[in-house]
Image (spheres, helix red, strand yellow):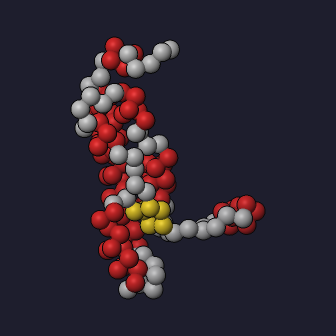
Amino acid sequence: YNEFHIKDLKRTGAVIFDMVVVNLYPFKDTVSKKGVTVEQARGNIDIGGPCMIRAAAKNFLRVTPVVDPFDYEMIISHMKSNDGKTSFKLRFSLAKKAFEHTAVYDRMIADFLEKRTIEEVSRCYTL
């Protein structure tokens, strides 16, 4: 952290954290249901989650981004054998996984919307 970051942390009373765990809204599960509307799909587009994931992944020098519940046990085991910390190697590996995760999520949303016509979308809303 640079001196400005430290000053801002002190000024705002914020705390330093070193792990971000995010499970995104279930967009894939939602849009795979028969008869799902554009509005139901839109309501399951996560915005804050991908932002937190990307911020954590960008900051892999100090932050561990976690996007897969199947990784929880591995991460816990790793931390137990590393004095409660994650290694640079693990953080970098999880950062790559995090960016891939958000890319796949965004691609899924784009693919869903690409298949919709303006007429179908218009039926969902009164503008």
Query: For the point 36% across and 27% down, which residue is it?
Result: 38
Across and down, in percent, residue 35 comes to 26, 28
Q: What count of labels does the image hold?
A: 0
Front residue (pair 88, 118):
118
What percent of the width, then of the height, locates residue 2? 63, 66
Residue 125 image point, x, y percent: 44, 19
Residue appearing at x 50%, y 14% in the figure: 127
Residue 49: x and y, percent? 46, 50
Q: With respect to residue 97, does 16 lie above or below?
A: below
Q: Quadrant of the N terminus?
A: bottom right
* Residue 93 in sight from this viewpoint: no
Query: Can you say whether 47 is above or below 65 in the image?
Result: above
Viewed as shown, does residue 6 lie left or right of 65?
A: right
Residue depicted at 40% across the width and 55% down the height: 23
Along the viewing direction, whichever of 34 and 104 lies nearer the viewer: 34
Q: Quadrant of residue 13?
A: bottom right
Q: Which residue lies furthest to the right in this view?
A: 11
Q: Can residue 78 be seen in this view?
A: yes
